[in-house]
């Protein structure tokens, strides 16, 4: 997954706040529930990209399973959403075409403990409110976003 720079998308602050409110509403309401709280999997605070790498396998599996069911992947977005002091919302939206070329949207939601993130990553999340990554097809998503040591 690669990060989407929201400033480059031309999102105004009012539109951005409306979008955040809608995303928060959707996280609270829930969706497919494919993601689980993966906080227990982390050994310590990690960067945004390191946490994204943990979710990467789940997003790839959703795409592969959906294609096995006859859908064609068209794109998607992965979000971290600052919506509570106790946890952050995590949401993925996947867009597919069915065999009649109709759009199909699948979503998965979860939450994550803010303590899983480094201080720098949490500062970015707090400042931006929503962090978005573009979901790419697993066949072309071969670049690991883990920082080089």
Image: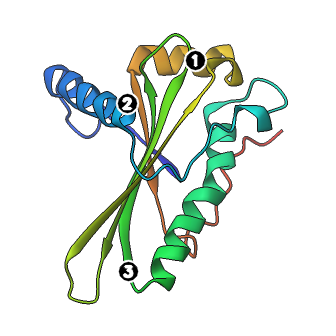
Tell me the crowding category of disc 1: few under 14, some 14 to 19, or many 20 or more residues within 10 angstroms, Cα based: some
- The image's mark for residue 82 is none
> Where residue 70 sits: x, y (%)?
41, 86
Proximity of marks 2 and 3: CB atoms separated by less than 8 Å: no
Secondary structure found at label 2: helix
Tell me the crowding category of disc 2: few under 14, some 14 to 19, or many 20 or more residues within 10 angstroms, Cα based: some
Q: How many marks?
A: 3
- Residue that appears at 20% across and 32% down: 11
- Residue that appears at 57% across and 70% down: 138
Quick check: 56 above or below 84? below
Query: Residue lying furthest top in this view?
Result: 85
- From the image, state whether disc 3 or disc 1 is nearer to you: 3
Point out the tag, 1 or 2, that comes first from the N-terminus. 2
- Residue that numbered label 3 is attached to: 72
Q: Quadrant of residue 58?
A: bottom right
Q: Quadrant of residue 132?
A: top left
Point out the tag, 2 or 3, that comes first from the N-terminus. 2
- The image's mark for residue 122 is 1
Rounded to the nearest angstrom, the CA distance separating label 1 from label 2 is 21 Å
Quick check: 52 above or below 67? above
Compare residues 41 and 14 and report the one nearer the observer. 41
Left or right of residue 19: residue 60: right
Left or right of residue 31: residue 122: right
Quadrant in which the C terminus appears: top right
């Amino acid at each position: 997954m690669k990060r989407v720079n929201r400033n480059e998308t031309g999102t105004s602050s009012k539109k951005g706040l409306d979008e955040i409110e809608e995303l928060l509403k959707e996280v609270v309401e829930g969706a497919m529930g494919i993601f689980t709280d993966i906080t227990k999997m982390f050994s310590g605070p990690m960067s945004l990209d390191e946490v994204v790498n943990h979710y990467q396998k789940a997003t790839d599996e959703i795409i592969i399973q959906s294609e096995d069911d006859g859908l064609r992947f068209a794109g998607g977005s992965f979000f971290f959403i600052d919506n509570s002091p106790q946890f952050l919302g995590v949401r993925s939206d996947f867009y597919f075409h069915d065999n009649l070329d109709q759009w199909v949207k699948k979503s998965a939601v979860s939450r994550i403990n803010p303590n899983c993130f480094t201080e720098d990553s949490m500062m970015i999340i707090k400042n931006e409110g929503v962090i978005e990554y573009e979901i790419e097809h697993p066949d072309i998503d071969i670049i690991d976003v883990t920082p080089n040591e």
